[in-house]
Image (tube, rainbow, N blue to C red):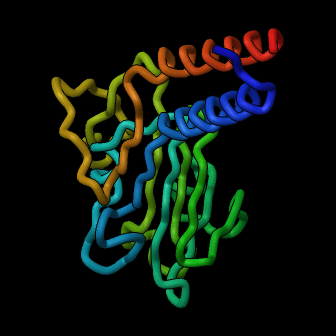
């Protein structure tokens, strides 16, 4: 049985594509506010919404809203607490904004439209270290507390489309081994 160099190259490309898909499969996409989206109408509790999620580096946070009335501003913690939209770290205005989470810790977002943040249109995306568990909602008036859940409910499809693979690193290693084997074998033909 022999492989041509072209056949080996095709195998390597196929394995590389699988590895790329597996890297993506470790991310989850969260739509802020679930089906309601990012809005000041309906008394949505974004603090409670985020408390039921376990965010990780690599996840994608999606804000869907009517761009005529809302926006998304990434702010510092003091700005978040004070609903200060005067000097945001970043501003998003498309109505369908996706933000890739690349670091651990708190990521604070508010709506900069007058009165919206004060009405509760703000969210704290807390990306935990892998050894931590999801936080519960802090009591009213206190700073955010981290209390482990006994068990965490599975997110609904609209709240967190989790594509995480539990055995992703093993599969990635197998794919890389197959690619190495294909390159090795192609050297003989």
Across and down, in percent, residue 171 comes to 49, 20
Q: From where the camera sits, is residue 105 visible?
A: no
In the displayed structure, 86 sits above or below 137; it is below
Judge left or right: residue 75 versus residue 22. Answer: right
Judge left or right: residue 142 versus residue 12. Answer: left
For image coordinates 26% across by 72% down, the residue present is 43
In the displayed structure, 68 sits above or below 64; it is below
Judge left or right: residue 140 versus residue 83. Answer: left
Q: Quadrant of the C terminus?
A: top right
Residue 132 figure quarter: top left
For image coordinates 34% across by 25% down, the residue present is 133
Residue nearest the observer in this picture, 29 or 90: 29
Q: From where the camera sits, is residue 154 visible?
A: yes
Q: Residue at the front extreme?
A: 1
Across and down, in percent, residue 36 comes to 31, 72
Residue nearest the observer in this picture, 140 or 69: 69
In the displayed structure, 139 sits above or below 72; it is above
Across and down, in percent, residue 116 comes to 45, 76
Number of marks in the image? 0
Residue nearest the observer in this picture, 110 or 53: 53
In the displayed structure, 29 sits above or below 27; it is below
For image coordinates 54% across by 90% down, the residue present is 68
For image coordinates 32% across by 31% down, the residue present is 134
Across and down, in percent, residue 38 comes to 42, 71
Q: Quadrant of the N terminus?
A: top right
Residue nearest the observer in this picture, 37 or 76: 37
């Amino acid at each position: 049985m022999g492989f041509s160099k072209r056949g080996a190259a095709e195998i390597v490309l196929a394995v590389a594509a699988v590895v790329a898909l597996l890297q993506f499969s470790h991310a989850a996409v969260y739509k802020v506010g679930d089906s309601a989206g990012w809005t000041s109408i309906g008394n949505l509790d974004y603090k409670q919404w985020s408390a039921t999620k376990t965010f990780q580096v690599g996840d994608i946070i999606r804000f869907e809203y009517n761009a005529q009335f809302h926006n998304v501003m990434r702010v510092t913690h003091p700005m978040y607490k004070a609903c200060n939209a005067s000097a945001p770290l970043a501003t998003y205005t498309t109505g369908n904004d996706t933000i890739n989470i690349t670091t651990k810790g708190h990521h604070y977002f508010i709506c900069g439209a007058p009165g919206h943040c004060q009405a509760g249109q703000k969210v704290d995306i807390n990306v935990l270290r892998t050894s931590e568990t999801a936080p519960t909602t802090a009591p009213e008036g206190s700073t955010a507390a981290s209390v482990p859940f006994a068990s965490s409910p599975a997110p609904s499809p609209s709240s967190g489309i989790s594509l995480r693979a539990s055995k992703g690193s093993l599969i990635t290693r197998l794919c890389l081994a197959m690619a190495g084997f294909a390159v090795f074998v192609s050297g003989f033909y």
